[in-house]
Image (cartoon, rainbow, N blue to C red):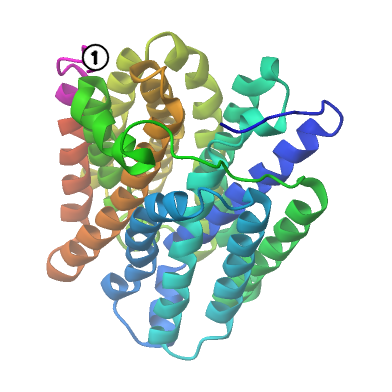
């Protein structure tokens, strides 16, 4: 067991450093979503191929999250997080300078390692950063960095790219990662790892046992897969959807994505209390909202006002998904929240990759309408998954 002694002084500065780190990591992962068109044009690849910039780091992160958590069991968390954040900076600066798409994909592999490792380690740090009464609030703030990046980081970066170009956007995130690295060095204390593996079979055994023995965790993983894959199948190509399907002018794309982000932040705050009381009901409503927004967007192409309104509804619904799913896992496995959250993070990253991959294949083979409808089909499938038998079984 770790000997945890938390000092109150500077506690929230430490939480802020970790939150900045996870916000930066997730913004870096999702940044290409708003930049697919200019990247594809300059590097001479299709929009579907450019979608690999989202798929590749998601797949790598899904693998690296549990592996780094296992390998770093006895390592100083502060040093490990600093190294991972430095890799984020290097990957984004390399992307900004890349002259060939293969170089971009290589940098995105490096980024994927950082994403999985940082999320896996940062998610369980709250008990070591703040006093016991503040652990719940600190955990919510740290995971708020994931939500904020999903709904706000990408639109802001896309808007900035209108002025600096896509290379400038990647360079800016690289600089942000340098700042985050400095914050981790300056504000985090030394955080040594544990000396022994927890429970029979160690950490890896516990990782395998929890979904096997807990039906609610299994249902939560299925919900994550359906909701996040369905969302990112469509959202990975939201820029061509707006430009080619809704016929939004190029100058308005960034503004609409910023509106989407603000709606998502509002959704996060609105859903939070309800998700804590009833994650099942909350996720059912969010699933229905996402499905309605995607289907309506598919059939209302060419009308900019309607498309803008539906984009805001989309952002409002998806903004609550992260906190809703996190609340589900906390309720499903209160005795082992850290392991449940690790599983959730891995499936979340995998789902981002699957969504971008499937969306890219569909876009190259069919139409944007088919991409939107397929995303809606997956989010619709999450509605019955919410009411699957959820009684917890543990051995």
Position of residue 289 measured from the top left corner of the image (x, y, whole percent)? 31, 27
Residue 98 position (above or below residue 225): below
Of all residues shown, which one is farthest toward the bottom?
99
Question: Quarter of the image containing the N terminus?
Answer: top right
- Figure disc tally: 1
Foreground of the two, 231 or 242: 231
Q: Secondary structure at mark 1?
A: loop
Position of residue 336 measured from the top left corner of the image (x, y, whole percent)? 41, 24
Q: What residue is at 40 percent from the left and 39 percent from the top?
A: 342
Foreground of the two, 109 or 203: 203
Foreground of the two, 236 or 133: 133
**Residue 249 appears in the rendering:** no
Position of residue 19 measured from the top left corner of the image (x, y, whole percent)? 65, 42
Using residue 249 as the reference point, say whether residue 186 is left or right of it.
right
Residue 21 position (above or below residue 13): below
Using residue 98 as the reference point, say whether residue 131 is left or right of it.
right
**Residue 285 appears in the rendering:** yes
Q: Label 1: few (<14), some or many (≥20) within 10 Å?
A: some
Q: Which residues are magenta?
A: 383-395
Q: What residue is at 25 percent from the left and 32 percent from the top?
A: 209
Quadrant assignment, res 38: bottom left
Residue 216 position (above or below residue 310): above
189 falls in the magenta region: no
Foreground of the two, 339 or 345: 339
Question: Quarter of the image containing the C terminus?
Answer: top left
Of all residues shown, which one is farthest toward the right?
9
Q: What residue is at 36 percent from the left and 62 percent from the top?
A: 60
Position of residue 331 measured from the top left corner of the image (x, y, whole percent)? 38, 16
User: What secondary structure do most residues of the magenta stretch adopt?
Assistant: loop
User: Which residue is label 1 attached to?
Assistant: 392
Residue 246 position (above or below residue 146): below
């Amino acid at each position: 067991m770790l000997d945890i002694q938390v000092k109150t002084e500077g506690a929230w500065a430490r939480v802020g450093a970790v939150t900045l780190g996870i916000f930066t990591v997730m913004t870096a992962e999702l940044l290409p979503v708003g930049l697919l068109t200019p990247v594809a044009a300059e590097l001479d690849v299709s929009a579907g191929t450019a979608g690999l910039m989202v798929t590749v780091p998601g797949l790598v992160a899904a693998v690296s999250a549990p592996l780094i958590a296992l390998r770093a069991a006895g390592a100083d968390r502060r040093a490990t997080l600093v190294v991972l954040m430095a890799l984020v900076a290097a990957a984004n600066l390399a992307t900004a300078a890349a002259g060939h798409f293969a170089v971009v994909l290589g940098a995105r592999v490096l980024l994927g390692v950082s994403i999985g490792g940082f999320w896996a380690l940062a998610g369980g740090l709250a008990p070591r950063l703040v006093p016991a009464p503040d652990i719940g609030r600190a955990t919510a703030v740290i995971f708020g960095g994931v939500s904020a990046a999903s709904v706000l980081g990408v639109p802001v970066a896309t808007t900035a790219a209108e002025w600096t170009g896509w290379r400038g956007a990647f360079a800016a995130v690289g600089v942000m990662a340098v700042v985050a690295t400095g914050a981790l060095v300056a504000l985090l204390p030394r955080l040594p790892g544990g000396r022994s593996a927890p429970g029979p079979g160690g950490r890896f055994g516990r990782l395998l046992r929890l979904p096997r023995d807990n039906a609610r965790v299994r249902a939560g993983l299925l919900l994550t897969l359906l909701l996040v894959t369905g969302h990112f199948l469509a959202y990975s190509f939201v820029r061509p959807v707006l430009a080619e399907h809704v016929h939004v002018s190029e100058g308005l794309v960034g503004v609409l994505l910023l509106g989407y982000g603000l709606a998502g932040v509002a959704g996060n705050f609105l859903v939070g209390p309800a998700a804590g009381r009833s994650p099942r009901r909350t996720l059912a409503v969010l699933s229905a909202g996402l499905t309605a927004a995607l289907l309506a967007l598919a059939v209302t192409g060419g009308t900019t006002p309607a498309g803008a309104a539906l984009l805001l509804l989309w952002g409002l619904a998806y903004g609550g998904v992260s906190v809703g799913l996190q609340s589900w896992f906390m309720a499903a496995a209160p005795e082992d929240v850290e392991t449940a959250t690790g599983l959730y993070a891995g499936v979340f990253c995998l789902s981002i990759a699957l969504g971008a991959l499937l969306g890219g294949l569909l876009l190259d083979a069919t139409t944007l309408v088919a991409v939107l409808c397929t995303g809606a089909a997956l989010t619709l499938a999450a509605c019955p998954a919410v009411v699957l038998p959820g009684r917890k079984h543990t051995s």
